[in-house]
Image (cartoon, rainbow, N blue to C red):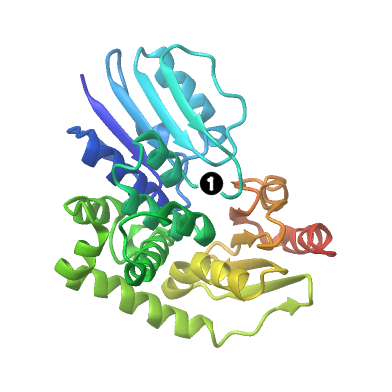
């Protein structure tokens, strides 16, 4: 019997698995990648008796491979908050799916474990830019008030680390970062005891963020804004957290951050307004390689020919936010 842990390479995916494996340890094969690499189940070659855990990865984007794995005789435990599509009816599948815009996979795992690793659940939720949800999780806990901001920052930095065209863009490959943080039951201890790793994330984040702050929007009004980032590693790394920061600073405005790619296309991050977390997934799903959640979605490869069409549809979607 073999175990496979399949997880998104961002803060939410990593922290969901940290919680689960600290409470339910397994000697598993880790299957992950950059944040936008979501077709992860294609890498799992399971056979009868194997156990597969999938965290923070869209079921709709992996439906054929999920069916294949279930037919192989493996059992699957699936936890996610992205578009699920049609959930297979199988006695070999246990799924915890909640597509609410205010729910993270780390929150779902925290609930499943009854708060056994609450602080890590909060880190993953902060990383998904669900600040109010994360603060609500910590309310009444033994986490000190001065530590809440530390958890928030760690979540942001871990989320930032997941963005890139490939693993060479990242400060830490997600599997390596998972193994580093897994050793700490309390994320505050990781920040203090593994200072060199935390500071590598923190300094990289601030350096990249200072570069993107100098850019002006391609277009902007009271309802929406579009930013265009260059084809550079720092831009690829910062694109997602920059989108989140814009959303937090302008909560009534929708944002699209497009990063140029070497093939002439664009990597797209879309954030719905914080005041109306709707429409991002529906918008991005109209384009090949697009999908996500209603509050936050993206397109992995928008062709240059589709740029004008995307901007028009983005503006139309959010013209009266």
- Say whether residue 10 is visible: no
Give me the residue at 55% from left, 88% from top.
214
Please provide percent x and percent y for residue 320: 85, 64
Please provide percent x and percent y for residue 183: 16, 52
Between residue 273 and residue 76, name the one nearer to us: 273
Please provide percent x and percent y for residue 105: 45, 43
Q: Is 114 above or below relative to 247? A: above
Horizontal side of 194 relative to 251 (left or right) equals left
Please provide percent x and percent y for residue 188: 25, 64
Quarter holding the C terminus is bottom right
Q: Which residue is mark 1?
A: 103
- Say whether residue 233 is visible: yes
Between residue 177 and residue 114, name the one nearer to us: 114
Local crowd size for mark 1, using a 10 Å CA cut-off: few (<14), some (14–19), many (≥20):
some
Give me the residue at 39% from left, 39% from top.
109
Give me the residue at 54% from left, 76% from top.
230
Horizontal side of 28 relative to 135 (left or right) equals left
As drawn, the residue found furthest toward the bottom would be: 214
Q: Secondary structure at mark 1?
A: loop
């Amino acid at each position: 019997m073999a175990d496979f842990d399949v997880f998104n390479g961002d803060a939410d995916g990593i922290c969901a698995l940290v919680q689960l494996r600290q409470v339910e340890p397994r000697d598993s094969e880790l299957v992950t990648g950059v944040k936008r690499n979501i077709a992860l189940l294609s890498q799992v070659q399971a056979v009868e008796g194997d156990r597969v855990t999938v965290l923070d990865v869209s079921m709709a984007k992996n439906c054929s491979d999920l069916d294949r794995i279930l037919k192989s005789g493996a059992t699957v435990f699936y936890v996610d908050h992205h578009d699920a599509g049609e959930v297979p009816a199988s006695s070999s599948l246990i799924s915890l799916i909640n597509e609410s815009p205010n729910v993270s996979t780390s929150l779902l795992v925290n609930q499943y474990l009854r708060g056994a690793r609450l602080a890590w659940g909060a880190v993953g939720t902060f990383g998904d830019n669900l600040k109010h949800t994360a603060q609500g999780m910590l309310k009444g806990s033994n986490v000190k008030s001065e530590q809440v901001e530390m958890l928030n920052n760690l979540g942001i930095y871990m989320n930032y680390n997941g963005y890139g065209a490939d693993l060479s863009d990242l400060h830490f490959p997600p599997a390596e970062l998972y193994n580093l943080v897994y050793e700490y039951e309390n994320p505050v201890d990781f920040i203090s005891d593994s200072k060199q790793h935390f500071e590598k994330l923190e300094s990289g984040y601030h350096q990249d963020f200072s570069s993107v702050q100098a850019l002006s929007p391609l277009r902007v009004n009271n309802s929406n804004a579009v930013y265009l980032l260059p084809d550079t590693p720092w831009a690829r790394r910062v694109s997602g957290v920059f989108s989140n920061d814009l959303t937090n600073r302008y909560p009534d405005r929708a944002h699209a951050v497009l990063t140029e790619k070497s093939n002439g296309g664009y990597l797209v991050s879309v954030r719905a307004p914080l005041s109306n977390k709707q429409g991002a997934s529906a918008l991005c799903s109209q384009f090949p390689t697009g999908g996500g959640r209603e509050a936050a979605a993206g397109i992995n490869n928008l062709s240059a020919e589709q740029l004008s069409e995307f901007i028009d549809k983005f503006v139309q979607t959010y013209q009266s936010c």
